Structure formats: C-alpha cells, structure tokens
C-alpha cells in the first residue's frame, strides 16, 4: 500500500483552502506580512505539490507598508465556477480592522485581477459558496449582532453576493455560533452542499492548543443549522502538549474524482518541548461519511505522520534544487520579501549569476521594508548556507544571513565593521533586546555562512570562498527564539539574506552567489 508523509506542505503554510478542477487540485494558504501574498500550489494526487506562484504578486494588489508582524493577509479561500478562479481573503490592518476582498483569474498561475473590496463585510476568514440555483454567497465571521456572551464569542454569517457588481446584496443571516460556548473564536467557515444537505465547516477554540474543527448542517443554505453531536470532528487538544502534532484546526473538505473524501487542515510540529518554530503547516487526512456526517480518519480520529495515500495516480514534480544559484531571470517562488518591496533594492541582472541586495536604511528590527529576501524553514532539523561578497564601508553597514521569526525575535549573522575593522558577528534579538553571541575578525570581502539546526540547537559557521573547511562561530544557540511560543503571532520561521545601512544612506550593496537549504530529518 502506498503511503504519504504529513505535513504535505511543511513549514509556514497555514489555513489551507483547496479545490478540485477535473483531475487537478489547487491550494492556497495565508501569508500575513510577507510579499508576494497567498502562495498557490497545484497537485494531481493531493500529496505532491508544486508552487505555481502567488495570487497577490503586484504592489497594486497588496499594500503591506508598515504592516505589523502577523497582520496582513489572513485565511484565503479558493473557489472555481464556470471557468473562473476566485480567491477571497481578509486584510487585517494594524488596528485589527478587517477588510475583505476577492480577486479572479482564468488561469490559477496568473495573472490575477486587482482586488474587489467589499463594503459592510465585517469579520475575518471570508469564503464563497456557489449554490446550484445560481446564487452565490459570502460567508464569514463577526461579532454576534446581539453582542458577545463570552470572550471571543463569534457568529458565522452569510449573505448573498453579486459578483458582477462586486457587492453584498440582501439580508445578512446568522447561521451558526459553534458547537460549544467554551470553544471560542468561531472562524474559518466553508459551506458545501453534499447529498441534499448544506454543511458549514468551521474552526473553533482559537488557533493555539485548543484549536478544533466542528460542523453543522441544514436543508436550507440560510439555516437553521444543526450541530453534529460528535463535534469536534477533529482536534488534538485532548492528546496533551507532549503529542508531536498540535493545534489542529481550520479544515477544508474535498472530494476526489473517484468519490473519496479528504480533509486539509493546519497543525504544528513541536520541537524541544512545546516550541513551534515552523509555525502552522498543511496536513492531509482521509474522511468517510456515516449517517450523512463526516468521520475524520475513521478508527483513529487524529492526524498521523504517515497514512495510506489517496487513490490517485502518484504525480511528482521536479524538485527545486537545494542550492539556488540565482542564474534565472526571476526569483524562485519560495522567496519572499518583508512587506511590499519599495525601491529597486534587489536585482538578478546587475551582476548576472548573483542576487544583489542594495543596502537600505531600514533595519530588520523595524516595521518597514528592509533589504531582505527570505524563504521558509521547513524542517525541525536543517542546514542552510550562503555565499556572499560584501565590503562594508562604514560602521553602519552590515550584510549576511538572517533567521527570522519577527522584528523582535531573530538571529543575524552579519559581516560589518567593529572598531573600524571587518568582523563577523552573530546577534540574537529576543523580545526587543539584542545580545552579541559571537564576534570574530574577518579579512576579505568574500565569505560563506552556514547554520545547522538539530532541534532547538542552532550552530553557526563561516569560511572563505576558497576554503573547504568550516570554522565554528557559535555552537548550539537557543533556537526557541524562532518559535511562536516566545515571539507570539501566527507565522513561522524564515531564513534569508539581508543588507542594511542601519539608518544611514548608502550606495553599497552585497552580492549573493548562492543560497542552499536542505532538511536533515
């Protein structure tokens, strides 16, 4: 029997939404303050995925200027109807105000349209449902019109939407407020019509340890909805904090072309105790139907690291090489910027075969758009390295390797000047304060930097471009600084390249010849 390994999308890929179009599967996830926004993936077997790109890949679609960590793009939903793909999502601003919009495309690889912003659409986690009678409905969450009975008490609501005019029409309908009042933060709603029933699938309990998936059904799209007596249909909150897969929730049901049912959802892997450096990842699990209700992973009821694969022809894709040598004309889709990139601070053409980062005054510790390009950490244990050419000309100028959770929690392995002399420094920023973990003199403008992580032990190395021997810079730095459990928020750890003049103007730049990443698990 062929099996597959979870997570099917490792690393920070939360809030999965997926559809099937014929024999093709498409999936999107949240992206928060990172640009481009909303990564989109394609699969033939629901296990092996290739990234097509991003839905929101133009500044005209996504303005993330000054967006705080873990604000920005939350919980997209992808749908397909009569030849058009729809992606609807919520932009959450720094005051936690929610702004819902959708974009469209005829090809999921793009180009996608500019946003259609919806008025009077409160709440987060917006979704669309195309009914059989031709009507289309918007679904989201909101504070109950009658008020909240307890903290984070939310109402799942529905309203017809006119996609031609880009606006909500008709009355709003409160359709469900969750399975249990103790399970707060009702969110992430999706509606399906299956066998004459309308089902609303939601997340409850917050996106932390008590996360869960619940379901209700009705004969009418506007309700009343009856909650399943077996709710929650999936959670790990009862398994304890020592279980290796935690905070399971935010699901999406999907039917294969052969009539089998599956569920995508988010969950996190822990390391070194209850630390979740990778953020929330995308998992897959089978679903059966009994008495017109779904049973998730029958006989087990939990997510597993290994499961029987879907009954679909296995289809693999060419894997991106472990080492990106920046030979192409575009950045690979694994790379992201912090917030919408402003100014021409990066180039693949100024020095062909290199990624050039021009120094910007913005620091990584600020809420701005620093000269930074990063990719997700996708393994609990991994190795990453880069090749850099950089000659600092002022005390303020630095460039190097960054391991990022957010502005206040990260590692920076930098080449700069110390008392006028070139030096490599490893800096840990934790809770807004910085500690110098290591500093060594370094002569020359070419250097290679490496980090190896084994669980929560992160060790840093360096060497010259001409050497084949790595020299230790710092052994077993505490990687928990990269976990959401210390840093807060909803994102996972990133690794990347960085160049800054730290508040000063500069015409200097750093050239990166390659960046490599590989899992060690």
Image (cartoon, helix red, strand yellow):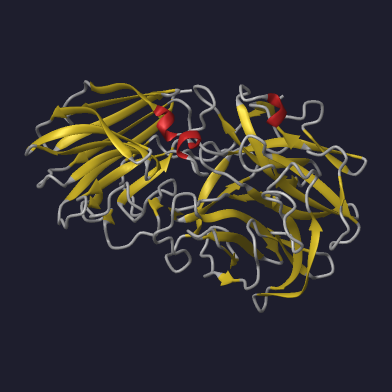
Q: Nearer the viewer, residue 288 or 274?
A: 274
Question: Which residue is at a point 60% across and 55% down the rendered structure image?
Answer: 76
Count of labels shown? 0
Left or right of 144: which side holds 4?
left
Outermost residue on the bottom side: it is 165
Question: Which residue is at a point 63% across and 23% down the rendered structure image?
Answer: 243
Question: Which residue is at a point 17% across and 46% down the rendered structure image?
Answer: 397
- Residue 25, position as x, y percentages in the image: 65, 49
Q: Is residue 354 visible?
A: no
Give the image quarter of residue 86. bottom right
Q: Is residue 436 visible?
A: yes
Give the image quarter of residue 497. top left
- Residue 127, position as x, y percentages in the image: 68, 59
Image vertical order of residue 298 relative to residue 131, above or below: above
Left or right of 228: which side holds 424?
left
Left or right of 149: which side holds 275?
left
Image vertical order of residue 190 relative to residue 84, above or below: above
Q: Nearer the viewer, residue 459 or 322?
A: 459
Question: Which residue is at a point 28% across and 55% down the rendered structure image?
Answer: 346
Q: Nearer the viewer, residue 64 or 344?
A: 64
Outermost residue on the left side: it is 420
- Residue 282, position as x, y percentages in the image: 60, 40
Specify the quadrant that holds the N terminus. Answer: top right
């Amino acid at each position: 029997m062929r099996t597959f390994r979870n997570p099917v999308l490792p690393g920070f890929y939360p809030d999965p939404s997926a559809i099937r179009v014929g024999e093709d599967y498409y999936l999107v996830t949240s992206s928060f303050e990172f640009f481009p926004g909303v990564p989109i993936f394609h699969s033939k077997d629901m296990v092996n995925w290739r990234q097509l790109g991003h839905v929101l890949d133009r500044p005209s679609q996504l303005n993330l200027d000054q967006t705080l960590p873990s604000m920005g793009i939350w919980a997209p939903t992808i749908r397909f109807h009569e030849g058009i793909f729809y992606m609807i999502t919520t932009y959450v601003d720094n005051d936690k105000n929610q702004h819902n919009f959708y974009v469209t495309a005829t090809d999921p690889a793009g180009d996608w349209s500019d946003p259609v912003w919806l008025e009077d659409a409160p709440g987060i986690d917006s979704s669309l449902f195309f009914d059989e009678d031709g009507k289309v409905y918007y679904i989201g969450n909101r504070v109950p019109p009658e008020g909240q009975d307890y903290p984070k008490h939310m109402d799942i609501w529905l309203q017809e939407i006119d996609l031609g005019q880009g606006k909500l029409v008709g009355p709003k309908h409160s359709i469900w407020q969750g399975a249990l009042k103790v399970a707060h933060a009702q969110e992430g709603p999706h509606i399906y019509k299956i066998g004459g029933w309308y089902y609303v699938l939601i997340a409850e309990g917050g996106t932390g340890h008590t996360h869960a998936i619940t379901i209700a059904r009705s004969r009418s799209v506007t309700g009343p909805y009856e909650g399943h007596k077996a709710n929650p249909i999936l959670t790990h909150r009862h398994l304890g904090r020592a279980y290796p897969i935690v905070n399971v929730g935010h699901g999406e049901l999907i039917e294969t072309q052969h009539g089998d049912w599956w569920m995508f959802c988010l969950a996190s892997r822990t390391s070194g105790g209850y630390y979740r450096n990778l953020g929330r990842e995308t998992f897959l699990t089978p679903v059966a139907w009994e008495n017109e209700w779904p049973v998730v992973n029958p006989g087990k009821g939990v997510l597993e690291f290994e499961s029987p694969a879907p009954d679909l022809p296995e289809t693999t894709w060419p894997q991106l090489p472990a080492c990106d040598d920046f030979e192409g004309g575009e950045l690979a889709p694994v790379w992201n910027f912090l917030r919408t990139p402003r100014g021409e601070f990066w180039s693949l053409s100024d020095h062909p075969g290199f990624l050039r980062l021009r120094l910007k005054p913005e620091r990584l510790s600020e809420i701005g758009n620093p000269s930074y390009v990063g990719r997700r950490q996708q393994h609990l244990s991994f190795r990453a390295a880069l090749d850099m050419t950089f000659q600092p000309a002022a005390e303020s100028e630095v460039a190097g390797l960054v391991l990022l959770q957010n502005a206040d929690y990260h590692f920076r392995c930098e080449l700069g000047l110390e008392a006028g002399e070139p030096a490599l420094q490893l800096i840990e920023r934790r809770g807004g304060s910085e500690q110098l973990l290591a500093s060594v003199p370094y002569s020359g403008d070419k250097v290679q930097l490496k980090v190896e992580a084994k669980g929560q032990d992160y060790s840093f190395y360096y060497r010259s471009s001409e050497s084949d021997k790595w020299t230790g810079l710092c052994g077993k730095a505490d990687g928990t600084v990269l976990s959401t459990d210390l840093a807060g928020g909803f994102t996972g750890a990133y690794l990347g390249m960085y160049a800054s003049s730290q508040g000063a103007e500069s015409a200097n730049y750093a050239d990166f010849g390659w960046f490599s990443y590989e899992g060690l698990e």
